[in-house]
Image: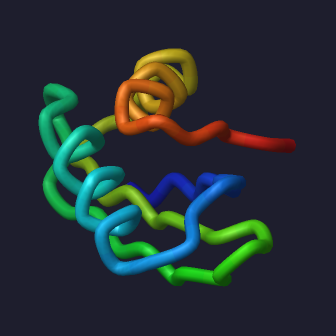
Amino acid sequence: METKLSISGMTCGHCVASVTEEVNAVEGVQDVRVDLVADGVSTAVVVSSEPLAPELLGEAVAEAGYTVVG
């Protein structure tokens, strides 16, 4: 299953690494792919074996220092 997240505030590769690390720590996440749009809204695709609560993913992104939008 894939879940798409729109994330604001990301500007560089370090941002991508931080978000990837935090989201990967959520139980059930199998893979995370981030398409960085510097100074814009980036997209993360989260692959999981079952549906994940949007709140959990949002909290993981916030822990990395960014915001899920939309």
- Name the residue located 24 percent from the left edge and 64 percent from the top edge: 17
Drawn side of residue 21 relative to residue 19, left or right: left
Taking depth in this image into account, of 34 and 17 the one nearest to the observer is: 17
Closest to the observer: 18 or 23? 18
The C terminus is located in which quarter? Answer: top right
Residue 60 percent coordinates (x, y): 37, 29
Q: Is residue 68 above or below residue 13?
A: above
Residue 37 is situated, as x and y percent measured from the top left of the image, at: 66, 83
Q: How many marks?
A: 0
Q: Where is residue 12 drawn, in percent x and y?
A: 45, 78
Q: Which residue is at a point 31% across and 59% down the rendered structure image?
A: 47
Q: Quadrant of residue 8?
A: bottom right
Relative height, residue 57 to residue 20 (above, below)? above
- At 51% from the left and 53% from the top, the residue drawn is 3
The quarter in which the N terminus is drawn is: bottom left
Q: According to the image, what is the colour scheme of the structure?
A: rainbow
Q: Is residue 15 left or right of residue 49?
A: right
- In the drawing, does residue 23 fall left or right of residue 11? left
| Vertical placement of residue 42 versus 56, above or below | below
Seen in the picture, residue 6 relative to 27 is either above or below; the reply is below
